[in-house]
Image (tube, rainbow, N blue to C red):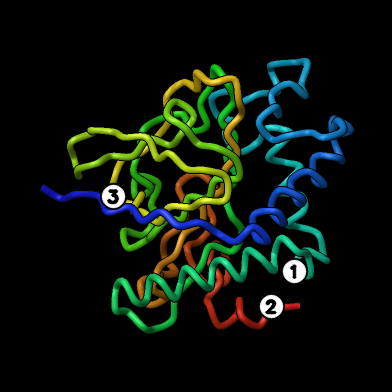
């Protein structure tokens, strides 16, 4: 029986605070931000529930668009968000090298994937393996909690390969988990809490495992170090 090994780690407050601030600044462009706004209450900002997550829109709500638009800005690589994403990613690469004993060049997801798990809703629309969408088998995923992920608002991951025995990935704000979502199934149940869960996930893989012939099934983005991924040497150069 192949058991899923999950490592939970706490990031620094500086990194966590920079991510939260970036999200809040991005949402300010929607003219929806209230004083002392918390991510937990994100679902209260929209009057029209049709703008919340629906099937086929798990990456295209107004909140997703607000964040992703910041990644396209010319100044993004000078932002506090990028600097701290870079620091965290390179720290994780060091951990993965020690854990796997693969000390060659690693590739890192260039921009994180953003997830919103609204009350009475889900953040992804099926339990799946990332390899179902043509992600490389060797990928390691980092799931980062911007706010609390607890039971029904948490990602649920397969405990034993092929058994579909799901357990919640409970995390406190600023904690992250390193796990394998390329071959272990994972997904969401209906969020029964009164809070929106906000999280990011981003992936790592030895550079030598990448191929120029494979693209993502949904976005048609190539899984190469000059597209979906960036190699660690290049990331280290983008430090100002």
Looking at the rendered structure, the secondary structure element under dot 2 is loop
Q: Is residue 205 above or below residue 3?
A: below
- Residue tagged by mark 3? 183
Where residue 42 appears, as percent x and y from the top left, is 71, 29
Residues at badges 2 and 1 in contact (C-beta under 8 Å)?
yes
Q: Marks 3/1: CA distance?
A: 32 Å
Neighbor class of circle 3 (other Cα within 10 Å; few <14, some 14-19, many 20+) is many
Q: Which residue is mark 2?
A: 238
Residue at 58% of width from left, 54% of height from top? 112
Residue at mark 2 to residue at mark 1: CA–CA distance: 7 Å
- Residue 46 in the image: above or below residue 229: above
Q: Position of residue 31 (x, y in %)?
A: 89, 33
Determine the residue positioned at 42% across, 24% down. Answer: 189
Q: Position of residue 234 (x, y in %)?
A: 60, 80
Q: Position of residue 206 (x, y in %)?
A: 39, 73
Q: What secondary structure is found at the residue carrying circle 3?
A: loop
Q: Which residue is mark 1?
A: 77
Residue 237: name its quadrant.
bottom right
Q: Are marks 2 and 3 in contact (CB under 8 Å)?
A: no
State which tag comes first along the sequence, 2 or 1. Answer: 1
């Amino acid at each position: 029986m192949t058991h899923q090994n999950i490592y939970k780690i706490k990031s620094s407050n500086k990194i966590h605070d920079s991510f939260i601030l970036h999200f809040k600044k991005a949402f300010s462009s929607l003219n929806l931000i209230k004083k002392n706004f918390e991510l937990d209450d994100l679902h209260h900002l929209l009057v029209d529930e049709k703008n919340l997550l629906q099937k086929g829109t798990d990456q295209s709500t107004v909140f997703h668009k607000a964040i992703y638009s910041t990644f396209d800005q010319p100044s993004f690589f000078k932002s506090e968000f990028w600097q701290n994403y870079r620091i965290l990613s390179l720290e994780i690469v060091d951990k993965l090298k020690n854990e796997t004993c693969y000390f060659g060049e690693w590739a890192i997801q260039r921009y994180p994937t953003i997830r919103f798990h609204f009350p009475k809703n889900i953040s992804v629309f099926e339990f799946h393996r990332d390899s179902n969408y043509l992600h490389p088998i060797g990928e390691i995923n980092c799931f980062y909690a911007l706010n609390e992920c607890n039971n029904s608002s948490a990602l649920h991951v397969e405990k034993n390969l092929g058994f579909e025995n799901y357990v919640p990935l409970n995390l406190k704000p600023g904690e992250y988990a390193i796990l394998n979502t390329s071959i272990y199934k994972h997904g969401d149940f209906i969020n029964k809490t009164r809070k929106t869960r906000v999280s990011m996930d981003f992936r790592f893989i030895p550079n030598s495992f990448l191929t120029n012939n494979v693209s993502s099934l949904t976005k048609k983005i190539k899984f190469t170090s000059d597209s979906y991924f960036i190699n660690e040497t290049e990331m280290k150069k983008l430090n100002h």
